[in-house]
Structure formats: C-alpha cells, structure tokens
Amino acid sequence: MSVSAPQPPDTPRAIENSGLDVIPLTSAVPGCNHTTQISVRRQSRRRIDPPEPPAAARFYSVSQVARMFGLSPMTVYRAIGAGEFPAVRIRGRLIVPAKAVEAMAEVATAEQTVVDAARWAANR
C-alpha cells in the first residue's frame, strides 16, 4: 500500500482539482520580465433562478405609512389614536391595512379631490 505525499496547493494538479483557474500575469513595469500566476475561483455553473416578485403587502407598519405620506410616525400614531386613521391593534402593535391606504388613494384619484382621512375613516 503506497501513500502519496500531499501536494502543496500551488501544484498544477491541486489547483486543477480545487475549482480554481490559473492566470499568468506579466509585470506592467517597463524592463521587468517577472511573471506571476494567480488563482481565480471559477464561477459556479449552477442555474440560479430569479427571485420571485414580492407579494403585495396586506398590512403596513406605522413607520411605513408615515414614510409613504411624508409624515412623522408620531403624527400617524396620533391620528390612529384619535380615530382619524384606520388601523388594527394586535397585542399593542398597530398595523395599517394596505386596502385602507389604497382605497383612500383611489377615492382621491377618482374624484380628483383631497381625502380627509378623519372623515374617510368615520364613514367606513
């Protein structure tokens, strides 16, 4: 039974089996003929599926709604607390139904008017 000595990683066989490509580089310095070899990892040949488009959100956080409307989160919390803006409370956390935001935008677009969130929430 013969045991072969392990090859150092810079030998051609070790690099060939490691998934690396060897690229010779010549020095860019004028008058220097020094050549260096570098190892570059090969790109995977696996097929990568494109990511699925994100599902439409059903709820937004108060911070997300505030960013959408250009308000501070505190202003949205106050409107929700006063009953002027629709929200759902789950164990102390407030979330805003995406349908409510979309419905307000649709009314504003369809009627080409300003939607008062407090009146809109009271009429629903």
Image: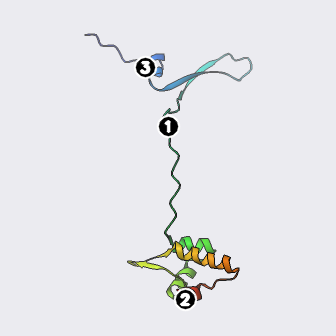
Q: Residue at x 50, y 32 (%)?
A: 45
Q: Residues within 10 Å of mark 2 (few under 14, many from 20)?
A: few
Amino acid identity at mark 2: Asn
Which residue is under mark 3? Answer: 8
Residue 2 percent location from the top left of the image: 28, 10
Which residue is under mark 2? Answer: 123
In terms of image quadrants, where is residue 115?
Answer: bottom right
Is residue 3 or residue 98 the one in the foreground? Answer: 98
Q: Residue at x 67, y 77 (%)?
A: 110
Residue 120 percent location from the top left of the image: 58, 85
Which residue is under mark 1? Answer: 47
The residues tagged by marks 1 and 2 sit, at their Cα atoms, a distance apart of: 53 Å
Residue pushed farthest right? 30
Of helix, strand and loop, which one carries label 3?
A: loop
User: N-terminal of the two: label 1 or label 2?
Assistant: 1
Q: Is residue 63 above or below residue 19?
A: below
Colour convention: rainbow
User: N-terminal of the two: label 1 or label 3?
Assistant: 3
Amino acid identity at mark 3: Pro
Of helix, strand and loop, which one carries label 2?
A: helix
